[in-house]
Image (spheres, rainbow, N blue to C red):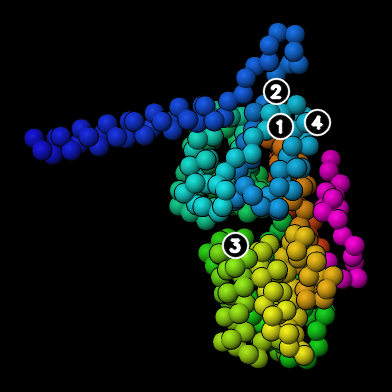
Amino acid sequence: MFKRSLYSIALALFLVTSALTIYFGKETFHFNTPPAGAESPPAYHFVLIPEELDNDYWHLVEQGAREAARHLHVHLEYLGPKQADLEEHLKTIDMAIAGKVDGIMTQAINDGEFSPLIKKAGEKGIPLVTIDTDAPGSSRKAYIGTDNYYAGFLAGKALLTDTEGEQFVGIVTGRLEAAHQKLRVQGFRDAVEHEKRVQILDVKESNITKIGAVEAAYGLLKAHPQITALYGTSALDGSGMAQVVERLRTDNPPYVIAFDTLPETISYLESGLIDATIVQYPYKMGYRAVQSLVALQEGKKLDELQHTETTVLRKENLPFSPLSQRGEVQ
């Protein structure tokens, strides 16, 4: 009798949770039909789900997506965790599916629950494309973004070009288990692998925060005072590493190569505390992602891998404007 009661309670909780997910999904991902005589309703309803909402990099992705949505008559929503949060990210995807949107754009997550969600979306006729980070083993329709291995390889080649003599490298990475971060580290390793003058000493995690990057860089330099170069693989790592180098104020500061072009990163590049940074094209990622979802709705075939450009930016290439990251969008 007791077991039967527990089973009944568990079943009731499950049904209530499922009902709430569907209800809030429909309420969140819903736009009103314009009144008679007003502009015609959008052709499609897409949602862009970033790693975290208040992030300069993802705002550039959003800008590109909104520009494409304006041109292609798409209603676009930008929703997700305020700060990087796996559970909240997955929940937002699930709510988008429950809300019956016409397409989903999101960063892939290295998690066992992510691929089943993509499959669930497909079963309900909702195409999903990944941005910035891919999930090649899933049923996503396409990946639009940086070739992260190649980006890491470029960083390694930049180190070889810009330095002479023995180099002892410390790496700061956003998350040790994040797929795109691992590719950026591996690409760097492979670029310097056959150079006997370069030795990678250690890798530390920043948890995709500036304070985490400061702590990781300080920990690397404290544990390995012989370090002559620092490489950061996520957007906030560069400014965190530069801040530590600035505080130490040594006569022979380490070579610093960062990732992305946030305003603070560019400022440190101007001052010489950062020597180079890897440039991505997030605006183009957002624009192409919307184009891809529209193409899928129209029954067109897509290239599964749509890599956007990656370049190296140095002080001599300044001034630099984020608008230059738009590139040519077609």
Spatial CA distance of label 1 from label 3 is: 32 Å
| CB contact under 8 Å: marks 3 and 4 | no
Chain-order first, disc 1 or disc 4: 4
Q: Is residue 14 visible?
A: yes
Residue located 80% across and 66% down the image: 267
C-alpha separation, residue under disc 3 versus residue under disc 2: 36 Å
Distance between the alpha carbons at the discs numbered 2 and 1:
9 Å
For mark 3, does the 10 Å Cα neighbourhood hold few (<14), some (14 to 19), or many (20 or more) residues? some
Residue that sits furthest to the left in the current view: 1
If you read the primary sequence from the N terminus, does the residue marked by circle 1 or circle 3 appear first?
A: 3
Where residue 111 appears, as percent x and y from the top left, is 48, 54
- Three-letter code for the amino acid on which mark 3 is drawn: Ile
3D distance between C-alphas at marks 4 and 2: 11 Å
Q: Are marks 2 and 1 in contact (CB under 8 Å)?
A: yes
Residue at 67 percent of width and 33 percent of height: 76
Is 156 located above or below residue 112 in the figure?
below
Query: Disc 1 or disc 3, which is closer to the eye?
Result: 3
Image depth: mark 3 or mark 2 in front: 3
Of the residues tagged 3 and 4, which is closer to the observer?
Answer: 3
Q: Earlier in the sequence, mark 3 or mark 4?
A: 4
Q: Which residue is mark 3?
A: 208
Residue under pointer 2: 43
- In the picture of the structure, the residue carrying the numbered disc 1 is 294
First in sequence, mark 2 or 1: give its number. 2
- What type is the residue that disc 2 sits on? Ala
Q: CA distance from mark 1 to mark 4?
A: 11 Å
> Is 9 rendered above or below residue 41?
below
Residue placed under numbered mark 4 in the picture:
71
Q: What is the quadrant of residue 245 in the picture?
A: bottom right
Q: Which residues are magenta?
A: 312-330
Q: Residues within 10 Å of mark 2 (few under 14, many from 20)?
A: few
> Is 119 in front, or is 80?
80
